[in-house]
């Protein structure tokens, strides 16, 4: 029943309050002594230059997209695994076709070099 | 056990979803907007739970809030949007946009008014017994009756993989 | 059971679980320092109380009273929110983990988990996926090159290994037939030939166990996969610009994730709370908890043992390992398991 999920919600709320409360509580008791050199972003001793939010390699984007695709595949596998005995041989074969198509895609991206230094 | 506080949770999730959806389109900082979208998706997952579909709620969190939004955040973080935030946001099509939005709103209101009789007023009682089996029911349906759309989905995923790699790999 | 009793029992369990988890996290730091120290042939913390017992308390007090340097150009709301997200998601995964079978306390019949829902495994995966945001936002909001790069690398590493993690669970699901963690434990009850327990690791999921452990080490950013937070690499990665309590919260989140992973590994592959049960009824209901705690402790010890022994991977080796080795191995494991179960 959906009632069973209410304790999880309460738990998440309590955990959030613990986390936020700790931060808030500590803000009350700690010393506060800011001055410019202490607050500068750390760059191994030199003065920071250039914008931190510059441009980064596109490899991270490829990783994120491939993650979404393979996560969808994993999610498709979950109800199949749970119902494995009921679905029988037919279900096994169709899932093998599904995995086969995705493995073809996986081999393609491997050969294409999209997984190099991903 | 009788469902308790269903009304409270419904309105709480509804306010949360609509509020964060409005925040998505009004926030200037794109990362804040992405976070508001994540909150909307989590509220929707809560709705799926209330509709006795826990598997769909779980998939919503794992895939949508935990996968697709990560992709959004990566793209937002990879593109430096600092100066865009401070620029003046102008939009030459605000008049057309307002007219279309009002027309769509009017259409939805009209559909609701004329079709109000077809909405169920009482929750379909037959779902009570099936709630514990949401995953199993989806499994049986997806790999039995809806096998062809399932295989087509795998082809769609293959197209997505190929498209993404081709688009992003002009010259690594 | 009426609504009031249900809510009350849940609240008691929530408070107890949080207390136990936070204490476990604190003393895992002490365990780690002592074990790594002994591996390196020196004593760990031993001054603060007998055997250094009060060291975590001293560390906690230090973190509370330390000055919190907030750099001026950070994105303040996200800077504050990132460690809170990390810690909240790390703590919430415990909500669905069962530490024992149903027990009776007077007239109350309750499972030894916060709630027994039938998509427990999916909830844990979902909460882990949302935990990636804590890392990514920490890196982005700190407005420092080291943090940004560390955050991107750490989140890319975490999402890459999440796929292998999810795929390694499929074999267990084929055997168990349900997402609910209690059902998975109950499907591993019993013994073969009188002494070999029917754990999933002996039922043929040894490869899946290996994949799960590797993926879990990478998810929790531990050696040998802890490049995003290694000091010699990117200063401290995504938590470079954090100090005092927020920094401590990142570490609490990391140790809480370790505890969750250890609990999950013992539930999924090592039979959960099964073990010899004897004695009077009160002891009988607490003994499964003891066996579960033994398994979790063994996992934590192995975690720390690996930390003291292995060097860390370079980033490209790390990603290649996740994408080019674990992923095909996990898919092969699924195919082989499916055919073995189908033939049976």
Image (cartoon, coloured by chain):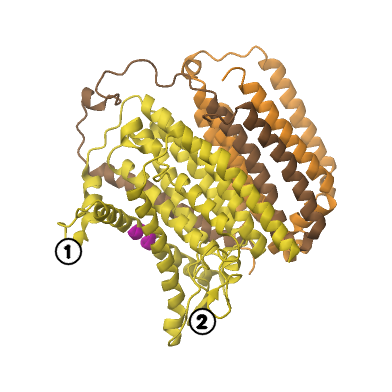
Q: Nearer the viewer, residue B31 or C271?
A: C271
Asked whether residue A15 is in view, the answer is: yes
Residue designated by label 1: C50
**Colour of chain A in the image:** brown
Q: Which residues are magenta?
A: C19-24
Task: Please state the total of marks drawn on the protein image.
Answer: 2
- Left or right of B160 in this view: A63: left
Supply the letter of whichever chain is orange. Answer: B
Q: Residue at x 61, y 67 (%)?
A: C183
Which of pointers 2 and 1 lies earlier in the amino acid sequence? 1
Asked whether residue B135 is in view, the answer is: no
Q: Residue at x 47, y 35 (%)?
A: C317
In the depicted structure, whether residue A81 falls above or below residue A40: below
**Colour of chain C in the image:** yellow
Q: Quadrant of the N terminus of chain B?
A: bottom right
Give residue B157's position: percent from left, percent from top.
72, 36
- Left or right of C5 in this view: B93: right
Locate residue C298: give its quadrant: bottom left
Instruction: Find out whether the residues at labels 2 and 1 contact each other: C-beta distance under 8 Å.
Output: no
* Residue A38 badge: none
In space, the residues marked 2 and 1 are separated at their CA atoms by: 42 Å
- Left or right of C17 in this view: B75: right
Q: Residue at x 38, y 51 (%)?
A: C306
């Amino acid at each position: 029943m959906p009632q069973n999920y209410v304790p999880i919600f309460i738990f998440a709320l309590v955990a959030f309050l613990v986390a936020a409360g700790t931060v808030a509580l500590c803000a009350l008791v700690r010393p506060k002594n800011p001055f410019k050199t202490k607050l500068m972003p750390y760059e191994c001793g030199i003065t920071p230059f250039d914008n931190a939010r510059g441009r980064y390699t596109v490899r991270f984007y490829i990783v994120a997209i491939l993650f979404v695709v393979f996560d969808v595949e994993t999610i498709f596998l979950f109800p199949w695994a749970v119902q494995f005995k009921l679905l029988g041989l037919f279900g096994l074969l169709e899932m093998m076709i599904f995995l086969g198509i995705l493995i073809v895609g996986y081999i393609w991206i491997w050969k294409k070099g999209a997984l190099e230094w991903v | 056990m009788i469902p308790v506080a269903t009304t409270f949770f419904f309105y709480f999730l509804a306010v949360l979803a609509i509020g964060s959806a409005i925040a998505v389109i009004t926030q200037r900082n794109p990362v804040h907007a992405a976070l508001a979208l994540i909150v909307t998706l989590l509220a929707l997952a809560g709705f799926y739970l209330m509709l006795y579909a826990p598997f769909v709620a779980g998939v919503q969190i794992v895939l949508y809030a935990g996968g697709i939004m990560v992709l959004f955040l990566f793209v937002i973080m990879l593109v430096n949007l600092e100066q865009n935030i401070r620029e003046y946001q102008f939009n030459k099509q605000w008049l057309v946009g307002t007219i279309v939005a009002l027309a769509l709103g009017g259409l939805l209101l009209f559909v609701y008014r004329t079709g109000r009789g077809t909405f169920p007023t009482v929750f379909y009682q037959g779902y009570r017994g099936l709630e514990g089996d949401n995953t199993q029911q989806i499994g049986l349906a997806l790999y039995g009756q809806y096998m062809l759309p399932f295989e087509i989905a795998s082809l769609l995923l293959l197209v997505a993989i190929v498209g993404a790699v081709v688009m992003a790999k002009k010259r690594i | 059971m009426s609504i009031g009793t249900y809510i009350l029992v849940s609240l008691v369990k929530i408070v107890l679980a949080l207390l136990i988890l936070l204490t476990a996290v604190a003393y895992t730091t002490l365990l780690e320092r002592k074990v790594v120290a002994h591996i390196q042939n020196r004593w760990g913390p031993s001054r603060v109380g007998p055997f250094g017992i009060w060291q975590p308390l001293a560390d906690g007090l230090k973190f509370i009273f330390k000055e919190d340097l907030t750099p001026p150009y950070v994105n303040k709301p996200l800077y504050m929110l990132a460690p809170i997200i990390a810690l909240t998601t790390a703590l919430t995964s415990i909500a669905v983990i069962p530490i024992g079978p149903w027990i009776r306390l007077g007239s109350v019949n309750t499972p030894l988990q916060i709630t027994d829902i039938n998509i427990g495994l999916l909830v844990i995966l979902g909460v882990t996926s949302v935990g990636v945001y804590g890392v990514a936002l920490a890196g982005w909001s700190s407005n420092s090159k080291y943090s940004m790069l560390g955050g991107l690398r750490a989140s890319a590493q975490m999402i890459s290994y999440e796929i292998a993690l999810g795929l390694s669970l499929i074999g267990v699901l084929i055997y168990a037939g349900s997402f609910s963690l209690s059902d998975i434990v109950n499907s591993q009850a019993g013994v073969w030939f009188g002494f070999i327990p029917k754990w999933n690791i002996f039922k043929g999921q040894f490869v899946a166990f290996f994949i799960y452990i590797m993926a879990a080490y990478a998810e929790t950013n531990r050696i040998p996969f802890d490049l995003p937070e290694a000091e010699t690499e990117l200063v401290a990665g995504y938590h470079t610009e954090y100090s005092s309590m927020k920094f401590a919260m990142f570490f609490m989140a990391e140790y809480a994730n370790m505890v969750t992973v250890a609990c999950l590994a013992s539930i999924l592959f090592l039979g959960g709370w099964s073990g010899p049960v004897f004695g009077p009824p009160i002891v009988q209901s607490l003994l499964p908890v003891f066996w579960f705690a033994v398994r979790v402790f063994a996992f934590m010890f192995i975690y720390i043992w690996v930390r003291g022994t292995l060097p860390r991977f370079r980033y490209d080796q790390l990603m290649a390992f996740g994408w080019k080795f674990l992923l095909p191995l996990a898919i092969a494991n699924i195919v082989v398991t499916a055919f073995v179960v189908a033939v049976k």
